[in-house]
Image (cartoon, rainbow, N blue to C red):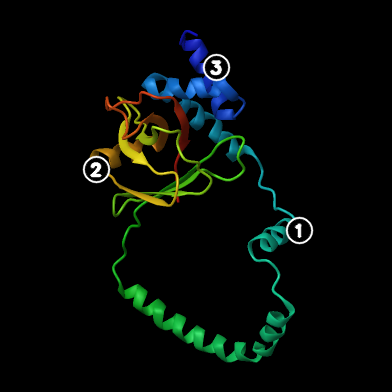
Amino acid sequence: MKKTPERIESLAAEYVLGSLKGQARARFERWMMESSRVRQEVWFWEEKLGQLSSEVPPVTPPRSAWQAIERRLWPKADPASASAGQGVRWLWPGWSLAATAAAVVLAVLLVQQPVQTPTPQLSGAIVQADISDPLWLVSESGRDNLLKLRSVAASAADAGKDYELWIVPEDGQPLSLGVIPAGGVHQVTLSDEARTALSQSRTLAISLEPRGGSPTGAPTGPILHVTKLYEL
């Protein structure tokens, strides 16, 4: 399939909308890794279509939706715990007064401290269409130049293979962040060049490479996943 400007534009729009599926989506993600022109078209459509959200009127979710979320996050306590909670309710008035006083003191201390501009942090998830849980959760600390990947549902790479993590820059070739394990928590210290590239493109990719990583410094195996990070 030829990468004509018209085809790139059409596929980029479908990719951002999520209507590009299966092998076509995987092929397009390989194009993204190979061509800055394709990546720029994707980011153009992300900006263009993202503006539509501001035109949609806000809708307050029903109370039942919040209750369902709360039940999932905090399952109902057993009766013994509930009765114990009722037994200490008398503590709340005094505790409330003490907490208010502490809050006043803390507010005074905070006013006296110099204001510090928070460092933006990026986070995201690497997902696969046919798996409900994310494969990896990604978090980044701008202050420490650390990128952390926590494995959730990732499976081990094929025999003789490794997963390799890449930053997909706005221009130029992908930057390798080394091989990553399929289990546990993995941390990568970003160089200044890598940190700058990631803050601009906010795009990561994972390829399947020979054991030990790509021998060429560029992706040689199939591109398995491409994901976008977002500011917290």
Residue drawn at 72 percent across, 55 percent down: 65
Q: Which of marks 3 and 1 is nearer the N terminus?
A: 3
The amino acid type found where label 1 is placed reads: Ser
Q: Distance between the residues labelled 3 and 2?
A: 35 Å
Where, by quadrant of the figure, is residue 217 drawn?
Answer: top left
Would residue 68 appear left or right of 2 to someone viewing this image? right
- Position of residue 188 relative to residue 82, above or below, is above
Residues at marks 3 and 1 touching, judged by CB atoms closer than 8 Å: no
The amino acid type found where label 2 is placed reads: Ser
Q: Is mark 2 on a helix, strand or loop?
A: loop
> Which residue ends up furthest to the left in the rendered image?
192
The residue closer to the viewer here, 25 or 151, is 151
Residues at marks 3 and 2 touching, judged by CB atoms closer than 8 Å: no
The residue closer to the viewer here, 49 or 18, is 18
Q: Is residue 208 visible?
A: yes
Question: On the image, numbered disc 1 is attached to which residue?
Answer: 64
Q: Earlier in the sequence, mark 1 or mark 2?
A: 1
The residue closer to the viewer here, 135 or 71, is 135
Q: Where is residue 177 shown, x and y percent of the image?
A: 31, 38
Q: Which of marks 3 and 2 is in front?
A: 2
- Position of residue 193 relative to residue 36, above or below, is below
- Callout 3 crowding tier (Cα within 10 Å): few <14, some 14–19, many ≥20: some
The amino acid type found where label 3 is placed reads: Ser
* Mark seen at residue 10: 3
Q: Nearer the viewer, mark 1 or mark 2?
A: 2
Question: On the image, numbered disc 2 is attached to which residue?
Answer: 191
